[in-house]
Structure formats: C-alpha cells, structure tokens
Image (tube, rainbow, N blue to C red):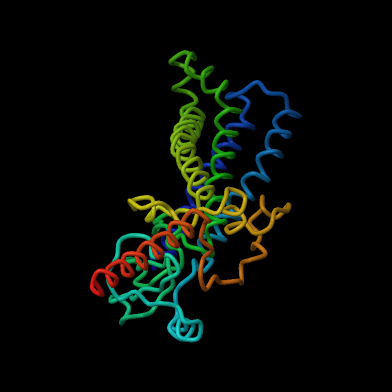
Amino acid sequence: MNNYFSFITVTSLSVFLYACYLYCLQNDHLNNYSKSLRIFLALISAPLFVLYYWAFVKCSACDPGYVDDTWEINAEENNIQIESRKIRNYTPNKYTICDKCNYLVRPERAHHCRTCQRCVLKMDHHCPWIGTCVGEKNLKFFFLFLLYGLFISLYVNITIMPQFVKSIYESDESKESHQMHHAAIFISISATTTLSLALIFMVFRYIYFISHNITTIESSYADKNPYDIGTYSNWKEVFGNFQWKWFFPFNPDNFYITNYLYPLNDMYMNINNIDINDTLLSNHNFNLKEDE
C-alpha cells in the first residue's frame, strides 16, 4: 500500500511541476523568448524528464533483492560459516541469522527492513519516496533517479530563472492581473531550487558510497571496509561492465547474478592472514612453555 501511495504521490508532483515549467515556458507574459527558443528548450527538457521518470519507475517497481530461504542450503553446500551472534559491523564472507524473519539465514551485507518486514540483499536504506528499500538489485536505478532528478531540476531552474527575476520587478498592478502566471513561476523556481540543493547532496553522497562500495548502514561501522576493491570494480558491482547502458535505467549485465560471497580487498585479506598467523604463533609459543 505504501508503495502505491509513494508512486502516485511522486508521479503527481513530478507531472505537476513539469506542467508548470512548460506553462511558464510558453506563456507570453512570463518571458520574451522567441518561439523557436521555447520549442528548443521544451524539446531538451523532455528526454531529461523521461529518463528521470523511467529511473523512478524502475527503482520503485524493481525487487531490491529480498532474501529467500535458499541461502541456508547455499551455506551448507559451499561450507560458508553462519554467524549466529548479532553484530553491528562487517561480517566478511560469513552469513548471519535474522531473528525477525523466523531465524532466516541471510548472506553478508543483508539487513532486515522494519517497514518492508523482510531482509534485503546489500540493504542501503528504506526510501519513502520510492515506497521500497534500496538494495543490491535497484541501487543503479536509485542513483540514476537522483542524478536525472538533479539534471532536470537544474535545467528548469536555469532556463526560467531570468523570467522569475524579471517578474519580481513588475508593477503591483501587473502582478495582480496575472496572479496565475506568477504563481506558476514561483512554484517552479521554489520547488526546483529546493530539489536541486537536496539532490546535489544526495548525488555526491552516493557517488562516494558507490566508489567505496559501502551502504548507508555500513557507513556507521567503525572497522575498515573489507569490500572496497577499487573504484572502477566497485562501480562495476552496481552498474556491470562499462558500456552505454550505464547511463540509462536498463538492467545491468550482472542483474540476474547474485553474489554468494562478496569479493574482499587485498588489505583485508592480508590483515586476516596476519591475524591467523599471529594466533597460531601464540598457540605454538604457549605449547612450548607448557612442555618446558
């Protein structure tokens, strides 16, 4: 139900704001652009809006990566360790158990969403705007939703800002006789300015997260990130191999591939090996003391 409400709300607001922009663009009172320039600006805005809304539909309708009951079998078949303790930290190459999902075995980086009442692969957060979680299977679409949302907001803001400034200095009589015109341009500017500021922060935040292969949940962890395997490799985990489809809300080439275990970086593997060797050495020295 929440998913449908979010979808209808965002769709209605998006269409309304875009309609306000087109109204401001074609209105003779609000601007002195030539007819050909107005058509050109509208034509440029159309694909940006389509890409924004397409990405929104994909990240809203796509399964974010809900965990099913096959992971316990996979752990047994591949001899993967299952960590039964509750640990709010990285659990590299270990599965965990969710006590809220009837002790469901889930892979590393999966977390339980209290809103969806399900565990999600590589869960980032639950987003009320798309009505579902952001996880392993829809992170690409969510990032493009933010990115194209930023592009269309900046584009609308820049192209009608001169007319907004012009309308401020109009006489009171003119403002009163064209209240609807001024309301449309005020709504367009206010909304796109607010969205642009919020989306700039969000886009750069997720550029950082994807580049370092961390999620919003994992960003609060104290330990070093074992999943950071290099910037390009990190982006490939989300978008697949680099190609033109990166820039469009198409399914990545690794969309149907699920990681049984995530690759770990060399630094973590070296630290892990050193820790193991130190433990063996300590045990060996302890045994020697007992023999003496």
The quarter in which the C terminus is drawn is bottom left
* Residue 239: image location, x then y, percent: 62, 56
Vertical relation: 59 (above or below) 179: below
Q: Is residue 47 left or right of residue 68?
A: right
* Residue 15: image location, x then y, percent: 54, 48
Q: Nearer the viewer, residue 195 or 213?
A: 213
Q: Residue at x 33, y 69 (%)?
A: 284
Residue 197 quadrant: top left
Q: Residue at x 57, y 56 (%)?
A: 140
Q: Residue at x 45, y 63 (%)?
A: 122
**Residue lying farthest right?**
36
Q: Nearer the viewer, residue 58 or 222?
A: 222
Q: Nearer the viewer, residue 155 or 234?
A: 234
Q: Is residue 134 left or right of residue 39?
A: left
Vertical relation: 15 (above or below) 126: above
Q: Is residue 250 left or right of residue 258?
A: right
